[in-house]
Image (cartoon, rainbow, N blue to C red):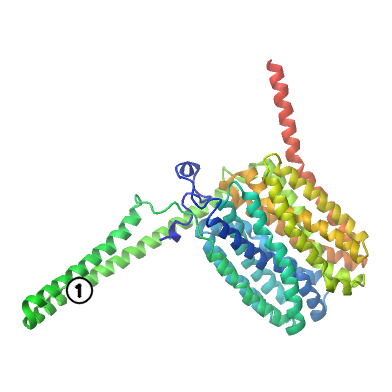
Amino acid sequence: MYTSHEDIGYDFEDGPKDKKTLKPHPNIDGGWAWMMVLSSFFVHILIMGSQMALGVLNVEWLEEFHQSRGLTAWVSSLSMGITLIVGPFIGLFINTCGCRQTAIIGGLVNSLGWVLSAYAANVHYLFITFGVAAGLGSGMAYLPAVVMVGRYFQKRRALAQGLSTTGTGFGTFLMTVLLKYLCAEYGWRNAMLIQGAVSLNLCVCGALMRPLSPGKNPNDPGEKDLRVLPEHSTESVKSTGQQGRTEEKDGGLGNEETLCDLQAQECPDQAGHRKNMCALRILKTVSWLTMRVRKGFEDWYSGYFGTASLFTNRMFVAFIFWALFAYSSFVIPFIHLPEIVNLYNLSEQNDVFPLTSIIAIVHIFGKVILGVIADLPCISVWNVFLLANFTLVLSIFILPLMHTYAGLAVICALIGFSSGYFSLMPVVTEDLVGIEHLANAYGIIICANGISALLGPPFAGWIYDITQKYDFSFYICGLLYMIGILFLLIQPCIRIIEQSRRKYVDGAHV
């Protein structure tokens, strides 16, 4: 079966020796690889786009349940945070079941979370249905979408990731307009029911995630058995049929009784043979599933806690600390900008063209442009990544100083373009740990981002409840972001120190 060989040759669990013996797949950097980009694009629209548009529902929940801003913001942050926090555990599902099955199950769970949330009686109910259930489903569909693009592309990986993740920008723009329209026409409860039906398209995206396989292996004894047994049973049926027809020609009506006697004698044997075949197939399937689960768990466990642990890589650990501080500064504007607009009496201008839509549209161009620049041979991906981070943190610091629509629009455009570095995160992660550890490593990174997204919006709402201003929320988050960037600078500093040591040692030997 095709799905039983989902990750042969290009699976992250396979050893490096196995990879060297395989020829490059014809779909690498072309063919079905662009369908992976399309599938990942729609996953980003349905998951990340809808989450970035939750500011619309956040306003509805504040009016409906009359809770504090800090408590209500936990609903959105739980959904965003759990989507990313479950990354390491979704890596276990990917290693065991494969990306296709994981994404399809995630689409079903995400849709169920949206539908159940429509019947919420209070904010605490939304914590479970929307925050946990929908967030878990989103995480199960999101990580396979990123990993599969990394598997299908080698030369143009940064561009492919950039194109696929532009779905976040398109999704933010489309979902903001859609949720506003649905809430105005049908109310937020019916809007969540409709959005739950729309989320079922995640299952279609998961079905498109066709696994890479070098083809059928004739040396596989399991495949030989599965081919031989049906052929044997087919031949026995054909031979029985031929025998019956021959006897009919020779014996006419008188031989019909003999034919019935022969069939009656052969029926018990055929029934027993079929039972043995079914039992053998069930045994093989159970054995294969057991080995698959065991192997997936062993690879997952060794990647995190074994001798080949990713945490022994100092640069990767520094990257994790950056992720812990960075993501909240990007999420906070999406959650609280709709209310900031109301506080500044800019609702009329914002209704014409929402500030979050400006971030979304420019975010699209930022991802593509930064991806193209990072793929240039003379450009370092790390330098592009660091420059985009510096631009984003500067924009976060300036945003509270703007009280006009034009000023906020310019800052939102800067936030959207500089946040395009998210398309480079899988590439940077792969540079640090290698393609064979990308699934586990990227799961850790998005888990750190999830913790940041989980705590950021409630923290900003809590600061507002104390100070009655959002200014201090952005200033504090900007400072935390700067701390994360300092961790990123550890990597080039280590390289400079190592190069200076090598030059000193070489000079001493000379």
The vertical placement of 193 against 485, above or below, is below
Q: Position of residue 282 (x, y in %)?
A: 36, 65
Q: Quadrant of residue 73?
A: bottom right
- Residue drawn at x 20%, y 69% is 238
Instruction: Between residue 301 and residue 315, name the one nearer to us.
Output: 315
Instruction: Specify the quadrant that holds the C terminus.
Output: top right
Q: Nearer the viewer, residue 296 or 217?
A: 217
Q: Residue at x 53, y 55 (%)?
A: 31
Residue pictured at 73% horizontal, 40% vertical: 491
**20 with respect to 418 (left or right):** left
Give the left or right position of residue 499, taking residue 253 as reference: right
Q: Along the horizontal axis of the image, is 38 left or right of 8?
A: right
Total numbered labels: 1
Answer above or below: position of 200 versus 507.
Answer: below
| Residue designated by label 1 | 268
Report x, y in % for residue 407.
90, 61
